[in-house]
Amino acid sequence: MRSVPARARLYILCVALAGAACAAPALNARTPWPAVALLAVLCAGCEQSALPRGRTRGLGTFYPVLLAAVFLLPPAAAALVAVPGALLARVDRRPHGIRRLWRAARLAPACWAAAWVHGALGGPAAGAGPDFPHVLWPAGAAVLAFCAVLAVLDGGILATAERVPARAAWRGLFARSLAPVAVHGLAGLMMAILWTSPYGPPAALLVLLPMGVSCWAFAQYHRERAAHQATIRALVQAVDLKDKYTRGHSERVGRASVMIARELGMDDERVEVLRFAGILHDVGKLGVPTRLLRKDGPLTPEERRVIELHPEYGHEMVRGIGFLGEARAAILHHHERIDGSGYPYGLAGRQIPECARVVAVADAFDAMTSTRSYRRARPVPAALEELARCAGAHFDPVMVAALTRALARDGWHPEVTSDVSRRAPEHAPDQGGNVPSARAAATPAGRGPAAP
């Protein structure tokens, strides 16, 4: 959303108008303005202190205060509480104004819907009664409504601003946000109960202390993760600058690796590791002489052996980066073959780490579907057909099948294609006279730039 498309701006405007309609009824004398003002100030203050830098969407928002407002106030007033903090929140990426507007626009309808559900199920009366467990049911329903509205709105912005396919834009958003928001909801419920108790609002503020500590730890985690991302971006940019023929290849391999990992049902932590593995699989090219990577003619046997050292170079470069985990093995072994004819160690079958088998398929797929200086990109169906032909000998059939299923469902939407202006006829032969295949794409046979 660095440059927001027109359709995304229209979508944000529509959501903002809906949020304004939700909050407008609060502009009357019957609204408990002292409570609204205090909760809005608390919400804005918590946003400034707890929001991890660089996060402008999702669980960076400090939800306990918002959910306390949901449990304490009428729907319109609850929607109004969210607006000042969202508009004043720190935003690191441009355009700042529309990002702040989006934060406010998405939270106001979610708070309104949650407060309406809470009131419709008798939540305020249950909270004031002596039987405490009864208050959990309307509060839980309100949390579900809150998550559902946010998931619907966030899916819309993914589809319009970031061009995520419609079939994938909403997948998993509700499930991923439910558990964290439920925890924040319990804290908000405790705040609401203490707020209406004889001890009053000062007692409710005590709930914010442990939540503030947890959000601080959460922010520290995301700052560390941002540092990891910056490290990876620097390495990838260095590879792209050195090997101009494959610019953008690393990011696309990371994306394809994620598709395979998710199709195989890997947990989120392993999916992230596979993304790192795909992005960094060619980092060892930094140790290969630039003249070989950019050579236009065929490689000599000696030059090919130098190129084939890049997995080992890459492994040495990243072996001390602890957060990469098994991605290091993928960097080392992504050119091994199932039949044992790959390099650097000639591993076969299950001897090859699973992450390396994933990256090998993603790597070959993008090499075939990307335009290079000496040939045009192959169509996705042709690339998948070639992968299937080589499955069992070169590639793991399980990984090939997983990529095929993922592409059939979600499609392939590469955002970066290297050297698109330097096109050759589709399926044009390389200088050795052969049509590039999966085998040629995955190994530096004949010419340096042919290697992904």
Image (spheres, rainbow, N blue to C red):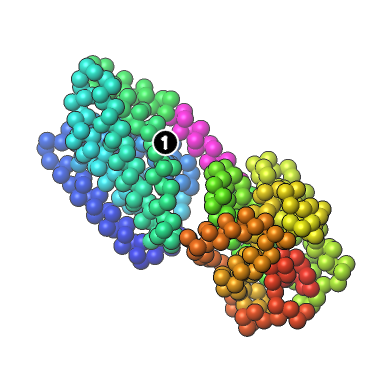
- Residue 116 location, x and y as percent? 21, 39
Q: Is residue 448 above or below residue 16?
A: below
Q: Is residue 62 left or right of residue 290?
A: left
Q: Quadrant of the C terminus?
A: bottom right
Q: Where is 213 relative to 304, above or below?
A: above
Q: Quadrant of the N terminus?
A: bottom left
Q: Residue at x 47, y 41 (%)?
A: 52
- Residue displayed at 43% across by 47% down: 172
Q: Which residue is mark 1?
A: 179
Q: Residue placed at 79% from the left, 52% from the top?
A: 347
| The quadrant where residue 366 appears | bottom right
Magenta stretch? 212-228
Q: Is residue 160 left or right of residue 133?
A: right
Q: What element does badge 1 sit on?
A: helix
Q: Nearer the viewer, residue 261 or 197?
A: 261
Q: Is residue 258 left or right of residue 61?
A: right
Residue at the left extreme, as displayed: 29
Which residue corresponds to the image point at 77% horizontal and 67% vertical from the top-left?
Answer: 444
Image coords of residue 101 (percent x, y): 33, 52
Residue with the most extreme right position:
302
Residue 273, image x and y in percent?
61, 46
Q: Is residue 400 magenta?
A: no
